């Protein structure tokens, strides 16, 4: 009766606390005046962004005008500012113009001024939601530049992004080849060559110079500067911010990333690719000849998730282009596409490493179990992605059921031994060391391993952690609906709140609630057996009380932290706990027989005790040494 009273009071206490918190949040929701002020603040920010955008557009105008053919006076004037590259300003291409190349997957718009990609559009993907009507554009409106700082022999520093390139578009079969040449003469130029194949996200991108050994100072490498201000493409700003980062490969397939935050920087050497990774889309610059040095910089642009909703991160990479015999020649490629493990892996360039599968065993589980199995279910069978998650979860849980069975069997054995362990506790109440020794002897004699219940649980932990890495990175879930969730890769809001709750957010997601309820009943079902199986040890924390607290803490943590995560992960956890409850119920009521276990333990006691393992022997020796030292101290 005392136990029930404690549980009832605890539940009432939690309900009261929750009610008080909701009342406080209601009382602290913004007034109409505060809402109006916030709206005005957002309008001001939008106006400032529009002004900045207009300003950025104006800066694209070349400060010098193109020379009229035969106008030697104008050419001489251009040479004072552009040196050897004044020739480029005399060509018909020296104007604001663009060339478009596209295939079934991407559309690229390349500017004459700067020769770099001014727009990169992914044709098969929509921003925010499947019905938004807006295609994902990784590059647009001057959010990205690719610039080479040109050090000339007459001590000038010019920027390629300010100079005009001459475009030439040709075809080789289905391949589109666009050469952009910044000319210092008829056969003297810096060339960008873009090669776009059919039905491909990867663009060949070569940079080379010809005949510029007398124009460019080759004493030190040219600095290639590539930057990208990433547009928001997903529903959740916080999740997109969490997964957006610079990742890179260096020094013979080593792999790392630039930390999140403001002003973060890394300077790796021998870099083979740099990835400006967003959540579900990525832009990658790779090179066949490694960059000897690099400077990679990352800045968070989201300070307030309610206001900063246009851009997520500012990325910048500075790499050297080394001269060879007075010229530059780099064969590279640019990837504009989804952060899809299978697509990235198909290029055989280690691009798939940018997908965060987890380290060590967690990554192996994702790579060799989760990705192949889920890929088979989602594509081969052609199921709804929600149904695929449910079947995927059932398969994983059935495969893990023998471990669940062993864990419960161990608890059942400990439960049968509990009266004898309690008796030993009373008998050796004043001698904890002797109590431990006798308890170990009882375990050995009965053929029970007290660690057997923990080991299966530890084996399941890597699978649980692997799922936390797999589902938020599963591109297949993006904008796929199931039941009330319109996007399994994002939160499944069923109620939008008029205020924001710290950590929780400004909406209520339903799948995390269902998962939290399932966790509550699972822990309620198992906590009683665990408490009965594991008696309180002197000097150790009261596990029974801790388990009672965790029954309420675990669901609360699920509600708080999973509210903004993708619905696919919460669905997986909900189904996983439901299945576990069913398996535990079947094992407890139809498989494990306590009477048989008790009879088996009694039979084991009559046999000669099993030989102790080396660990048990060592533990026994330590206990005996401590006991001897204790007796010696008493004699003194």
Image (cartoon, rainbow, N blue to C red):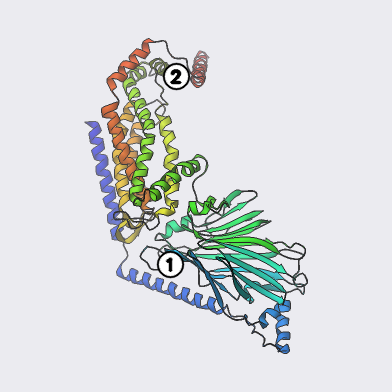
Q: Is residue 277 visible?
A: yes
Tag 2: Cα neighbours inside 10 Å, few (<14), some, or many (≥20)? some
Q: Which mark is in front, 1 or 2?
A: 1
Can I make out residue 542 in this image? no
Q: CA distance from mark 1 to mark 2?
A: 70 Å
Dot 1, how many residues are within 10 Å of its Cα: few (below 14), some (14-19), or many (20+)? some
Tell me the residue that label 2 is attached to: 433
In which quadrant of the rendered view does residue 535 lie?
top left
**Which residue is the extreme one toward the front?**
173
Examine the rendered structure and indicate whether residue 198 appears above or below residue 566: below
Instruction: In the rendered view, tell whether residue 622 sits above or below residue 26.
Output: above
State if disc 2 and disc 1 touch (CB < 8 Å): no
- Residue 498 in the figure: left or right of residue 41: left
Which residue is drawn at the image coordinates 41% and 24% (left, top)? 450
Place of residue 553 in the rendered image (x, y in percent of width and height, measured from the top left): 34, 43
User: Residue 511 location, x and y as percent?
Assistant: 31, 50
Q: Is residue 459 above or below residue 442?
A: below
Q: How many marks?
A: 2
- Closer to the chain start, of discs 1 and 2, is 1
Q: Which residue is mark 1?
A: 135
Q: Name the residue at 33% across, 21% down.
A: 418
Residue 499: x %, y % from top left: 33, 61
Q: Is residue 211 left or right of residue 387?
A: right
The vertical placement of 99 against 409, above or below, is below
Secondary structure of residue under mark 1: strand
Label 2 SS:
helix
What x and y, as percent, mark residue 296?
60, 59
The dot on residue 176 is none
Q: Which quadrant, please, contains the N terminus?
A: top left
């Amino acid at each position: 009766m005392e136990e029930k009273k404690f549980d009832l009071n605890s539940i009432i206490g939690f309900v009261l606390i929750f009610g008080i918190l909701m009342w406080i949040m209601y009382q602290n929701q913004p007034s109409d005046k505060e809402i109006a002020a916030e709206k005005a603040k957002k309008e001001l920010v939008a106006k400032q962004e529009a002004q900045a955008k207009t300003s950025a557009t104006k800066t694209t105008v070349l400060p010098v005008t193109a020379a009229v053919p035969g106008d030697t006076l104008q050419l001489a004037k251009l040479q004072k500012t552009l040196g050897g590259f004044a020739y480029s300003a005399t060509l018909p291409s020296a104007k604001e113009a663009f060339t478009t190349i596209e295939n079934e997957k991407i559309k690229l718009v390349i500017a004459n001024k700067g020769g770099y990609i001014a727009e990169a559009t992914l044709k098969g993907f929509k921003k925010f939601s499947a019905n938004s009507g807006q295609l994902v554009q990784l590059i647009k409106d001057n959010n990205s530049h690719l610039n080479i700082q040109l050090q000339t022999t007459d001590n000038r520093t010019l920027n390629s992004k300010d100079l005009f390139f001459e475009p030439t578009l040709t075809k080789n079969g289905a391949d589109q080849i666009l050469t952009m040449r910044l000319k210092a003469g008829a056969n003297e130029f810096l060339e960008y060559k873009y090669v776009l194949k059919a039905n491909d996200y990867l663009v060949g991108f070569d940079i080379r110079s010809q005949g510029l050994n007398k124009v460019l100072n080759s004493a030190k490498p040219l600095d290639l500067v590539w930057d990208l201000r990433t547009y928001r493409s997903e529903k959740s700003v916080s999740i997109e911010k969490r997964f957006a980062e610079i990742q890179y490969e260096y020094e013979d397939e080593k792999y790392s990333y630039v930390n999140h935050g403001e002003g973060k920087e890394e300077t790796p050497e021998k870099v083979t690719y740099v990835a400006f990774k967003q959540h579900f889309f990525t832009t990658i610059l790779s090179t066949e000849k490694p960059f000897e040095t690099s400077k990679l910089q990352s800045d968070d642009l989201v300070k307030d998730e309610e206001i900063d909703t246009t851009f997520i991160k500012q990325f910048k990479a500075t790499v050297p282009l080394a001269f060879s015999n007075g010229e530059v020649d780099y064969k590279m490629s640019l990837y504009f596409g989804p952060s899809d493990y299978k697509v990235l892996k198909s290029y055989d360039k280690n691009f798939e490493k940018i997908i965060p599968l987890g380290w060590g065993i967690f990554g192996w589980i994702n790579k060799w179990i989760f990705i192949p199995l889920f890929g088979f279910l989602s594509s081969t069978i052609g199921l709804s992605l929600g149904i695929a998650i449910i079947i995927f979860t059932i398969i994983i849980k059935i495969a893990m059921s023998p471990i669940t069975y062993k864990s419960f069997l161990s608890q059942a054995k400990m439960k049968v031994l509990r009266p004898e362990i309690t008796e030993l506790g009373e008998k050796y109440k004043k001698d904890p060391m002797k109590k431990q020794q006798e308890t170990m002897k009882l375990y050995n004699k009965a053929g029970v391993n007290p660690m057997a219940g923990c080991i299966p649980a530890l084996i399941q932990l890597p699978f649980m952690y692997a799922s936390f890495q797999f589902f938020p990175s599963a591109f297949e879930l993006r904008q796929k609906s199931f039941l009330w969730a319109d996007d399994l890769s994002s939160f499944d809001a069923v109620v939008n709140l008029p205020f924001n709750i710290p950590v929780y957010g400004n909406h209520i997601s339903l799948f995390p609630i269902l998962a939290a309820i399932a966790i509550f009943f699972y822990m309620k079902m198992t906590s009683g057996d665990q408490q009965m199986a594991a008696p309180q040890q002197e000097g150790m924390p009261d596990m029974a009380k801790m388990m009672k607290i965790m029954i309420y803490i675990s669901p609360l943590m699920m509600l708080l932290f999973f509210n903004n995560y993708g619905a696919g992960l919460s669905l997986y956890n909900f189904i996983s706990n439901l299945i576990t409850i069913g398996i535990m119920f079947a094992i407890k009521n139809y498989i494990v027989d306590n009477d048989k276990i008790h009879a088996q333990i009694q039979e084991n006691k009559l046999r000669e005790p099993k030989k102790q393992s080396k660990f048990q022997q060592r533990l026994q020796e330590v206990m005996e040494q401590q006991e001897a030292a204790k007796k010696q101290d008493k004699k003194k």
